[in-house]
Image (spheres, grey):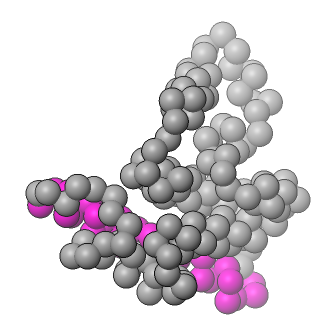
């Protein structure tokens, strides 16, 4: 679970975005800070982004998500097979909800498909194709999604 200080930091970062007095300060922030990209993503992701290698930054972020899931599930599988196995609502290796009612079961199932879809639709093309070139906004959208997935793992105690 996220610690009290992690939650406090998130609140402070979000509050900064609503400070009308210093609208100009937000322009000086790094795009990762403006978009609240998760700080646990490897430093390599930010370096690739800063150097203009947007597709590679996305690829590295989702490789990291894959490795985090592997580590917590203690499974050597990777990619779509890993995500479908680990988040299976019938017998999850990583349980994101209490699974005590249909809503919680549906949420687990939904995250199963979100994690799997992220690997199939975002990570895989950047790992297998040679002509993928993302713009900064697309990369930031992908990294925000990776951040959401990582935060959901942390919220469930898989930090």
Q: Is residue 62 visible?
A: no
Query: Of residues 98 and 132, which is closer to you in this image?
Result: 98
Q: Residue furthest left?
A: 101
- Residue pictured at 62% horizontal, 48% vertical: 38
Residue 34 as seen in the image, left or right of residue 1: right
Quadrant of the snapshot with the N terminus: top left
Q: From what the image shows, is residue 31 above or below residue 98?
A: above
103 is within the stretch colored magenta:
yes
26 is within the stretch colored magenta:
no
x, y percent for residue 71: 56, 70
Q: Quadrant of residue 53?
A: bottom right
x, y percent for residue 63: 64, 73
Residue 26 as seen in the image, left or right of residue 152: right
x, y percent for residue 68: 57, 66
- Residue pictured at 68% horizontal, 56% vertical: 41
Q: Is residue 126 visible?
A: yes
Q: Residue furthest front?
A: 74
x, y percent for residue 73: 46, 72
- Residue pictured at 52% horizontal, 36% vertical: 3
Please state the extent of the stretch shown in magenta in the rendering. 102-131
Q: Residue furthest top?
A: 21
């Amino acid at each position: 679970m996220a610690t009290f200080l992690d939650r406090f930091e998130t609140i402070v970062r979000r509050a900064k975005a609503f400070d009308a007095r210093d609208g100009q300060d937000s322009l000086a922030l790094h795009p990762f800070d403006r978009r609240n990209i998760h700080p646990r993503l490897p430093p390599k992701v930010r370096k690739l982004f800063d150097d203009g290698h947007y597709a590679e930054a996305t690829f590295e972020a989702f490789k990291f998500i894959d490795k985090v899931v592997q580590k917590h599930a203690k499974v050597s599988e990777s990619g779509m097979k890993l995500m479908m196995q680990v988040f299976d609502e019938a017998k999850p290796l990583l349980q994101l909800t209490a699974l005590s009612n249909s809503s919680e079961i549906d949420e687990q199932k939904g995250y199963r498909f979100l994690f799997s879809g992220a690997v199939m639709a975002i990570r895989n093309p950047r790992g297998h194709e040679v002509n993928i070139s993302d713009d900064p906004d697309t990369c930031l959208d992908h990294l925000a999604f990776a951040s959401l997935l990582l935060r959901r793992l942390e919220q469930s105690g898989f930090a």
